[in-house]
């Protein structure tokens, strides 16, 4: 088995870049409200962040905790978006889940370890390639800044999928009824319960969408049952160990939609990718 390394999800930050004022704004193109354009007495409550490709550009979210200096907040959000561009070009991952259940009252354990590999150092080069409109493509909520930035690239095959949103919470249909494939791409649904910050919750959900696709493409599962009978009256033990291991590389990992559940601040991510050849 391939050597396994554990990884605690971490945001990696790189070189900063200001938004390009010449960019028309994704809100104008898609018709989706992204900034706080409603009257002050009726603030926009955003829960769904659609990032479908627009014309000849891909759209990436950049998410960062809000700083006292607004320019620094934008800087970190753009660097997070650049990280997602790097992952889009190539990402590899490993997933290991091991569950052990024994006959004793406390003989239970469940351990999950994950690792992601991508060009972390090279992500800095994509910051200057991102464009956004500060008036329409920036949203702040829960001390978190979310930027929707455009990157001049196109998926190898176009995606015609369009989510359907219902209810006051704008819950997308893919949360309860996900597709297995979308326009020839593998589909992954990432989920993360509420963490200490919304930014970290979004990051975990995003990474979990990567692991979801990797698990769909390559899984090794193993069960080991152990029974032991000794000479004494209570010298009897049973144990069941279940291991799931998956590893693989993806091209064109791309998030189509992100939904923040307003009731509990959990985050759901809809993503597509192709298995690397």
Image: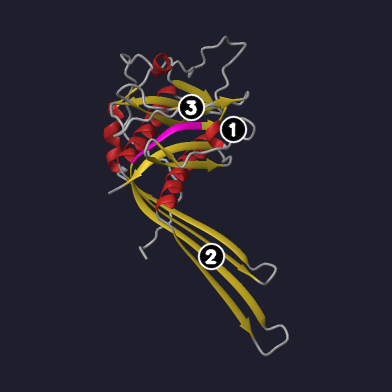
Question: Does 262 sit above or below residue 19?
Answer: below
Left or right of 218 on screen, residue 65? right
Q: How busy is the neighbourhood of tag 1: few (under 14 within 10 Å), some, or many (20 plus)?
A: some
Left or right of 91 on screen, residue 177? right
Mark 2 to mark 1 CA distance (whole Å)? 32 Å
Residue 258 point in image, percent of width and height: 49, 32
Question: Does 104 sit above or below residue 91?
Answer: below
Mark 2 to mark 3 CA distance (whole Å)? 37 Å
Instruction: Provide the residue designation for mark 2.
Output: 242
Whether the magenta-drawn stretch holds residue 253 is answered as yes
Instruction: Provide the residue designation for mark 1.
Output: 261
Left or right of 41 on screen, residue 154? left
**Earlier along the polypeptide chain: callout 2 or callout 1?**
2
Secondary structure of the residue carrying tag 3 is strand
Whether the magenta-drawn stretch holds residue 137 is answered as no
**Earlier along the polypeptide chain: callout 2 or callout 3?**
3
Place residue 13 in its image quadrant. Answer: top left
Residue 11 point in image, percent of width and height: 42, 40
Q: Which mark's residue is nearer the viewer, 2 or 1?
A: 2
């Amino acid at each position: 088995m391939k050597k396994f390394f554990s990884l605690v999800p971490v945001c990696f930050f790189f070189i900063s870049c200001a938004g390009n004022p010449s960019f028309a704004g994704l809100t104008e193109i898609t018709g989706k409200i992204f900034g706080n354009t409603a009257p002050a007495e009726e603030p926009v409550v955003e829960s769904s962040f659609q990032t479908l490709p627009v014309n000849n550009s891909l759209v990436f979210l950049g998410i960062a905790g809000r700083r006292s200096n607004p320019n620094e907040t934008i800087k970190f959000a753009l660097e997070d978006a650049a990280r997602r561009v790097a992952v889009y070009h190539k990402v590899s991952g490993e997933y290991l889940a091991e569950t052990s259940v024994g006959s004793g009252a406390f003989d239970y354990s469940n351990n999950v370890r994950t690792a992601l590999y991508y060009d972390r150092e090279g992500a800095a080069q994509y910051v200057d390639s991102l464009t956004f409109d500060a008036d329409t493509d920036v949203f702040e909520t829960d001390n978190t800044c979310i930027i929707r930035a455009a990157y001049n690239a196109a998926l190898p095959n176009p995606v015609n999928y369009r989510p359907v949103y219902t209810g006051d919470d704008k819950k997308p249909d893919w949360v309860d009824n996900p597709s297995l494939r979308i326009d020839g791409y593998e589909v992954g649904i990432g989920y993360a319960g509420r963490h200490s910050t919304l930014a970290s919750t979004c990051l975990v959900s995003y990474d979990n969408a990567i692991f979801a696709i990797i698990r769909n493409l390559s899984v090794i599962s193993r069960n080991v049952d152990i029974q032991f009978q000794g000479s004494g009256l209570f010298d009897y033990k049973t144990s069941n160990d279940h291991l799931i291991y998956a590893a693989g590389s993806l091209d064109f990992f791309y998030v189509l939609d992100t939904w923040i559940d307003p009731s509990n601040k959990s985050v759901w991510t809809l993503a597509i990718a192709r298995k690397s050849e």
